[in-house]
Image: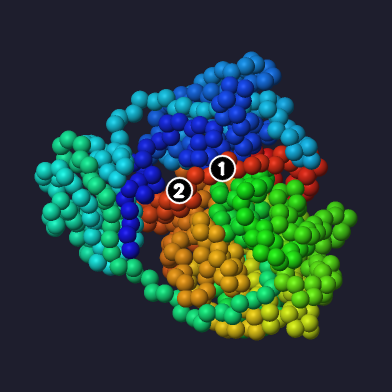
Amino acid sequence: MVFDLIETFSATDSAGPTTEIRAGDGRAAGNFVEGWSPPERDEEGQLVAWSNAPRASISFDAGPHPLDTTVVLDCVVREPMHALFSRLNGRPSGSFRVSAGAQQIRVALHAEQQVAGRNVLELSVPAAYVPAERHEITRRFGVRSLRFDATRPPASRVEGDRLVLVPGTTVTYFLRVPDGARLMFESGERAAGDRLRVTVQADGRQERLAVVTRGEPGRLAVDLGPEAGTIARLALSADGPELGLVRPRVEGRSMRPGASGPRPAHASNVILYVADTLRADRLGCLGYNRPTSPRLDAFARESIVFESAMAQASWTRPSTASILTGRYPAEHGARSLMSALRKDVPTMATILAQAGYDTAAFVTNLNVAPRFGFDRGFGEYHYLEERDDRETVYVSAAELNAAAFPWIDARGDRPFFLYLHATDTHAPYRPPPAYAERFRPRDIHPTIDPRTPVVELLQKPALATADNIALLASLYDGEVALLDESFGALLDHLRARGLDRSTVVVFVADHGEEFHEHGGFDHGRTLYQELVRVPLLVRLPGAEGGGRRVRGLARQIDVLPTVLAVLGREPPADLPGRPLLDGALPPEENLMETELGRPALAGVVAGRWKSVWGARAGGERVELYDLVADPDERRNLAADRPIVVGYARQTAARLRLARGPQAAAETTVVDPETERRLRALGYVDAEAR
């Protein structure tokens, strides 16, 4: 294996803070976070991103040590605005009177308001709110570019295939060190090896000064063998003038054995069953001690069970979009309440429709409604709407079956792809009385009614007593059992028609649910395991390989390439996800995020380690957990394991950068009625909290 120090330089802190963001520049596309149109040219031929939401956000990197900075926005204004407000990381940072025409707005960003790394500048733009059904860009306020002015010392850099080290600076990499590892580079400079300082520190060990040795003419090397098999920090600096390292890289042998297992027979049909808000640890096949899931447990014995499957987000829209596209939220675009799937991103439906499959979906959650782009590629897309006058609000999984079965029966011999999205386990937890009583503990005395909304426990912490939590958890278990029964009815329907021998069935959840394990309820606001560990079961045609259990990491972005592999089709070459069958190596890391709560959070799972971070008032909070020794995430080890935290953060940056240039994420401006319904369902954006 090769770890290229040139390719990964942009993920290091040494790459420096953001100095400029230009609309239409693929390298900066990810900076236009929310509330912006795709870039288009104005009358002067310059690319402009137009705001099309009441709040438009731009992210930037302040580097490891934020400085007082002035950001200069090169803007185009079509109508005068009495007040344009700016917020930095959620706190007010300025207000401006804006006249019509091209102009520059200068916003002071004080160092104490910034955090190391990613920051978010939010603009409140008057009169930029357009009903979603009009699908218009307002073109009242646009941004051509942002320039960040601050006095900064010279920094190390990349020039072609050279890593240029500037005296007084250090370039730091974090990596898993492979067996037989050596840092290799070439240099035409005399005495380059004498002027290069290399320090290495493995997690939990003392730092050591490594020795540079000469090998073939012009090539130098550093032995990293003592750190093999560890997560380590590799720091490079120059003594004396600037020093250029040509093609610097870490070479070694892969430490990961390939997965074993027979190559599955190809399927003709696909059923993707997404269970909304279903925790992995509430299924018997994944360790639960209550009989909530007899049909899924039987299904698991015929399936390949991924015991450590992880979500890309902790709420419905971004996580389901990752399942359908095989891409991280930053790439598919559906990452916030105001955003939709990018139109240029292929989905499971568009790929299979082009291959001649009949495609249909029957879904029950507003977050995957057609207005957010989830209907692309489907010949039929049935969004069964929520109703406030329905006891459960959502359509039940049994009703979902009743709607989908006729479509299945009408397929004949044509191959099909069917996506079902069931929402029984989403709040409100209102199972029928028999299911509600089945799991209720006998020795509890709750002070809330079974119909008490979960949001009341969020708003009134005194209600979060052990007995009240036990009542909610038992109602949730009743919903799991109800979902299990309906999923079993779907399997019976397939078997009765002989479709079980030709259909791959994927059962997965979009995210889990919290019951006060970390002080909260519901989902979308944190990234703890109760929210991001999800069930993932894949039954191949004829139950081939059934009963196999895979302990290695699996991710939602791996679902699409896995399905395509089973169908005998090549997945798009640029997918970050990978097939989980056919002896493929398991993924090494999982990247996850949520922007539904405040603060926005990002996290990485790498082996036994999980790190999560987010900006808070007064500084950033970082968490690190050892999921093997502490699966309940009770002991934050971030202060004790800085090398592992550094590895997680650099991995997150590397995974995002590896996606290459991206178009700006298209956004959907949610109309007032949709916003009201989202709020009624518990989806409230960060600004409202």
**From the image, which quarter does the C terminus lie in?**
top right
Query: Horizontally, is 63 left or right of 163 in the view?
Result: right
> Which-is-in-front pick, marks 2 and 1?
1
Q: Is residue 584 above or below residue 61?
A: below
Q: Nearer the viewer, residue 610 or 215?
A: 215
Residue 251: percent from the left, percent from the top?
28, 61
Residue 594: percent from the left, percent from the top?
58, 50
Pick out the residue farthest to the right. 389
Query: Mark 1 sits on what residue?
Result: 663
Query: Mark 2 sits on what residue?
Result: 657
**From the image, which quarter does the N terminus lie in?**
bottom left
Q: Is residue 504 above or below residue 125?
A: below
Residue 413: percent from the left, percent from the top?
76, 76
At label 1, counting other C-alpha atoms closer than 10 Å, the crowd grade (few under 14, some 14-19, many 20 or more) is many
Tell me, yes or no, if residue 151 can be seen here: yes
Identity of the residue drawn at 15% across and 37% down? 240
Identity of the residue drawn at 47% across and 48% down? 660
Q: Nearer the viewer, residue 439 or 461?
A: 439
Which amino acid, mark 1?
A: Ala
Identity of the residue drawn at 14% across and 48% down? 193
Q: Is residue 237 above or below residue 524?
A: above
Identity of the residue drawn at 54% across and 19% down? 104
Query: Horizontally, is 413 left or right of 554 in the view?
Result: right
